[in-house]
Image (spheres, coloured by chain):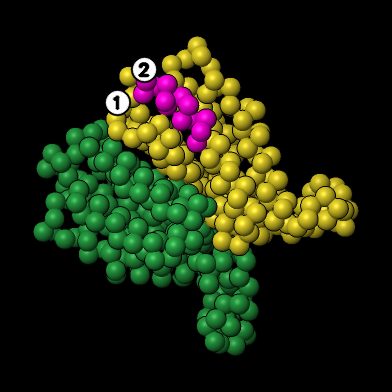
Chain colours: A green, B yellow
Amino acid sequence: LIHHEGFNACGVQDITSAANVPKGSFYSYFESKEAFAAEVVQDYWTSILGRHGPLLQDLAQLPVARVRNFFDALIGDHVSWDFSRGCLIGNLVLELAGTSESARFEMYRVLREWEAMLAECLHEAIEAGQISRDGSASDLAATLIEAWEGAVLRSKVERSGKACERFRDLVLPAMLA
Amino acid sequence: LIHHEGFNACGVQDITSAANVPKGSFYSYFESKEAFAAEVVQDYWTSILGRHGPLLQDLAQLPVARVRNFFDALIGDHVSWDFSRGCLIGNLVLELAGTSESARFEMYRVLREWEAMLAECLHEAIEAGQISRDGSASDLAATLIEAWEGAVLRSKVERSGKACERFRDLVLPAMLA
């Protein structure tokens, strides 16, 4: 619900109705709607890791191919949503980073964790001479995540996968050269 | 107000109070809060164009330098906001693209206009041999905008300019090589 409609557009009533629980029970589980947002971020990230995380650890592939396969799998998620939802983390950053410190911290943490996972592959790629451009593995990982978040944002406004394709076909090869 | 707090977090009352007009007058000016959002997007874009647009037309500079100067000026805006606001267009995309077709269309239009302006410089740079990598000028322009939007998003969650610096120091040189 939050991924589709946005955090501020969903009331606690909408959330509890969708979950089929009484509205009053919400605050037995979560201290506030912002605390709930932090759990939503964590849950979304756990789901991505469970489904696509193994691609980053697939030692049968060269490290750059692992990174490509991971982003291809993410693109597949957005294809299945018709590009209408965007990245839940990016959406919540833009809605909540200014107003909720606890949600902002959780998003900060998840983005750092994602960055560290990509950086591990990229570090291997740099060591193996697969990537020769300047920049540390973690700076490269961060730029990939940032460019990806922007591509998903554009895809959401265009309701089309063109920005994700540009990320795959132009940004990835340029940054991983 | 909307740039700082988010669209759904601001009520019509907050907006009219900030503008020092009676709440009831809002709907004499705007058909709906979403129609107001479309005007806000247009106003933000007009302000950016007025302040930084001339940098893209500064014929004393080579085309790639014009593009760099333009993004440097945008970074300056975000420095002055302590990186806490993000790009108003990106923010509104993520809040409204799923729920308001009129706002989504206005953001689509502004992003296309921005893309066309950058593409003009990049086309010149390609013709002059300043850029030799693959990809049309408009695809390159689009990837720069997308990577920029992601960098600003990350800056907002980190409250730091590091992602904007990565955009300037890693993405721009890689994409404009």
Which region shows up in magenta? B115-128
> Which numbered disc covers residue B132?
1
Percent x, y for residue A129?
13, 39
Q: Pointer 2: what residue?
A: B128
Q: Quadrant of residue A11?
A: bottom right
Percent x, y for residue B64?
41, 22
Left or right for B14, reference A124? right
Is residue B116 in the magenta section? yes
Q: Residue at x 53, y 72 (%)?
A: A1
Q: Secondary structure at mark 1?
A: loop
Magenta stretch, overall SS? helix
Left or right for B101, reference B135? right
Q: Nearer the viewer, residue A57 or B40?
A: B40
Q: Residue at x 22, y 37 (%)?
A: A177
Q: Nearer the viewer, residue A26 or B58?
A: B58
Left or right for A37, reference B136? right
Give, as a three-letter code, the residue at label 1.
Ser
Whether the residues at callouts 1 and 2 have beta carbons within 8 Å, the answer is no
Give, as a three-letter code, the residue at label 2.
Ala
- Establish if A37 lies above or below B74: below
Q: CA distance from mark 1 to mark 2?
A: 9 Å
Q: Residue at x 52, y 67 (%)?
A: A4
Disc 1 packing (10 Å; few <14; some 14–19; many ≥20): few
Left or right for B113, reference A105? right
Which chain letter matches label 1?
Answer: B
- Please say whether residue A124 is visible from this viewpoint: yes
Percent x, y for residue B24?
88, 57
Disc 2 packing (10 Å; few <14; some 14–19; many ≥20): few
Q: Residue at x 58, y 27 (%)?
A: B52
Percent x, y for residue A21?
55, 87
Q: Residue furthest top?
A: B60
Asked if labels 1 and 2 share a chain, the reply is: yes
